[in-house]
Image (cartoon, rainbow, N blue to C red):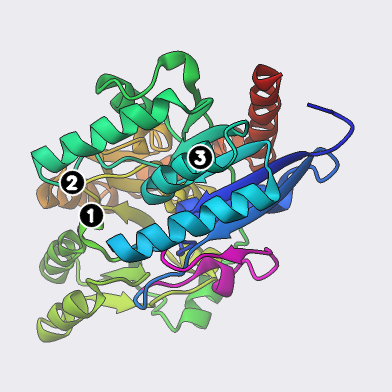
Amino acid sequence: MNQARPIKIIQVIARMNVGGPAVIVAELMRGLNPAKFQVVLMTGFCAGDEADYLDEVARDIPVTRINGLGRSVSAIEDIKSFFTLVRLIREYKPDIIHTHTAKAGVLGRVAGLIAYPSAMRVHTYHGHLLHGYFTAWKTQIVIVIEKLLATFSAALIAIGNQVQEDLLAVRIGKVKKYTVIFPGLDKLGSQSKSSAKDELVLEHNKTYIVFVGRLTQIKRPDRLIEIARHLKVKHPLVELLIGGAGEKSAEIQEIAKKESLPVVFLGWRNDIGRILSAADIAVLCSDNEGIPLTLIQASQAGLPIVSTNVGSVRDIVVDGETGILTEVNSNGLIHAIDELLSDPEKLARFGRAGKERAEALFSLQGMIDAHEKLYSQVIKKKD
C-alpha cells in the first residue's frame, strides 16, 4: 500500500447503544491520528428500549446509518443490511474493515470478503456468546460460525485475557491472530460526595451501592432485587442506586415499588461521574461479561467493587485487593457486600488500590496507541 495516504478504515458495529462497545468505537473514531488513518463509522439503529450513545453522548461522531443492522434478527432486514454493506464497502474501498459485536462481525466480514476482498478484516470480541445467551446446540452453531469467520480475519482483538482464553478454548481462531487490548477511558469527571448527593437528591446519611448498566437478562437485575431485599432487613441506612434501563426495567421497578425496597432508579444518564461520586460501593451481578467499562469507571472513582467472577472482570478487579469476586449467585454478592459494609477500612483501601490500577492499565491513549500499532501491522501483512 502507498503509505503517502492515510490508511482507510471502516468501523462496523450493529448498533451504538449505550455501553462498552459504543464507548470504545467512539473513542477510536475521535482518537486515531487523522494524518495516518481515515476512518468512517457504519452502524444500525438502537431499539426503542435502548439509549443511543451517538444521540446521548457522542453527537460529534459522523456516522452512516444502515437500516436492519440493529439488535433484532430478521432474515429480510438482515439481507437488506448485508447488501447495503456490500455496496458501501465497494464505494469506500477500505484498507481495513474492523467489525465489532457478533451480528456486525458476521455481516461485515462476509460483506467485506465479497465486496472488496483485498481489505484486511479485523474483529473485536467485546465479550462472547458462549455463556448465558443460548441453549447448548445454538451455542455450538455460534462456535462453528465464529471458527469459519476467524479463518479469513487478519487479526482478532479480545478486550480481556479471559475473553481470549474462552475463545481459544473452543478453538475460535489461532493464538497468533489474537491481541488483547484493554478498553481505555478518559479521566472520569468526579466531584465531592456531598455535592453529587445534592444534585441527585440523595440522602447524606445513607450509604449507596451503585449499579450502572443495561437492565437485561444477561445482567441479572433480579439479583439486584435480592440484594435490595437483604438491605431492607439488615442495613436500613444502605440503598441501591441503579443507573440504566432495558427490557427488565419495568419489571424490577414494579417489584421494588410493591415491596418498598431501598432502590433509587435513575434511568439512562450521561453524568456517570456524578452517579459514581455519590456512591460507596459498585456492584455487578451478570451471568456473562466481556470487560465492563462501568467497573473501570467505578475504579477511576475510587469505589471498591463487588462482582460475579465472569468474563474478564478479573482484569479490572483483583479479588481481595480492589474488590471481591463472587460465585455467580445472589448469596455470594450479598455476603461480599456485608463484608465491605462491616469494614470501612477495607472499603477505603480497596477503593484506593482500584483507582491506582485503573490509572495504570486502562488509559485512553494506551488503547488508541495499541489499535494504531495493530492496524499498521495488519497493513504490513497485506503488503
- Classed neighbour count for the residue bearing mark 3: other residues with Cα under 10 Å, few (<14), some (14–19), many (≥20): few
Residue located 62% across and 55% down the image: 41
Q: Secondary structure at mark 3?
A: helix
The stretch in magenta equals 50-69
Label ID, residue 178 = none
Amino acid marked by disc 2: Gly
Amino acid marked by disc 1: Ile
Residue 276 drawn above or below residue 155: below
The question of residue 66 being in magenta is answered with: yes
Foreground of the two, 308 or 152 = 152
Q: Secondary structure at mark 2?
A: loop
The quadrant the N terminus occupies is: top right
User: Horizontal and vertical percent for residue 8?
Assistant: 72, 42
- Please say if the residues under marks 1 and 2 sit with CB atoms less than 8 Å apart: yes
Label ID, residue 114 = 3
Q: Quadrant of residue 5?
A: top right
Residue at the extreme right of the image, as rendered: 4
Q: Classify residue 66 as left or right of residue 329.
A: right
Residue 187 visible, this orientation: no
Q: Which residue is mark 1?
A: 218
Q: CA distance from mark 1 to mark 2?
A: 7 Å
Q: Which residue is mark 2?
A: 132
How would you classify the magenta stretch by its main secondary structure?
loop
Residue 46 visible, this orientation: yes
Residue located 10% across and 45% down the image: 135
The question of residue 119 being in magenta is answered with: no
